[in-house]
Amino acid sequence: MNQRAAPYVLTPDQARSHPGTFPPVKAGAADTGGLLTVTEGVLGPGTPGPPLHLHEDSDECFYVVEGRLLLQVGEDRHELGPGCFAWVPRQVPHTFANVSASSVRLLGIAVPGGIEELFAEQTAYFARLQGPPDLAELAAIGARHRGRLLGPPISVDAEAAANRP
């Protein structure tokens, strides 16, 4: 996959590919010749992120645009505010959550590109879900995209989140 897209510009509410996928894809593998995927997501107040997981073949980084994100990398937890950046190499367990009372907006980059296929399959699963997610099904989706589920998401205490900035 060496071909790259012609230059393009997106408005804040536009996604480049995989409409309706969370997080919205701003540049995908098809745009970048497979080099990377760029997403921009918003997590509402007190919202858990994905279960603790790792990617076998993808490095990820996160840049917090606004709000406060609790990021777990391995056993360590870090609270990231606006302007904070985190690098998560492949095969390193990680998860995140918004444990505050305001939304978090973050930019995510995965290298190489292609993680948008995982996000698209997960979004489709959540769209048809009735009841709580089945961790075995999420693990199977992750495995199809060279990821491994390792544990639960960060627990979000709604009352504590409401009292955080």
Image (cartoon, rainbow, N blue to C red):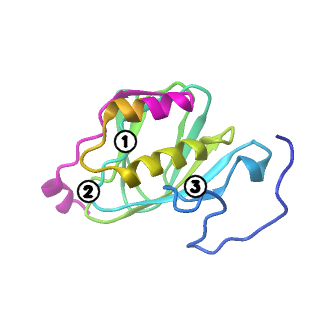
Q: Which residue is mark 3?
A: 39
Disc 1 from disc 3: Cα separation: 21 Å
Q: How many marks?
A: 3
The crowding category of the residue bearing disc 1, from other C-alpha atoms within 10 Å (few below 14, some 14 to 19, many at least 20), is few
Q: Is residue 156 magenta?
A: yes
Q: Can you tell which of label 1 and label 3 is closer to the viewer?
A: 3
Q: Is residue 50 magenta?
A: no
| 3 or 2: tag closer to the N-terminus | 3
- The image quarter containing residue 132 is top left
Horizontal placement of 79 versus 93: left or right? left
The residue located at (56%, 28%) in the rendering is 146
Q: Nearer the viewer, residue 163 or 1?
A: 1
Residue 60 pos. (x, y %): 57, 39
Horizontal placement of 127 versus 39: left or right? left
Label 2 secondary element: loop
Residue 122 pos. (x, y %): 46, 45
The residue located at (37%, 41%) in the rendering is 78
Q: Amino acid at mark 3?
A: Thr
Q: Which residues fall within the magenta stretch?
A: 140-165
Q: Amino acid at mark 2?
A: Gly
Badge number at residue 78: 1
Residue 124 pos. (x, y %): 46, 50
Q: Which residue is mark 2?
A: 46
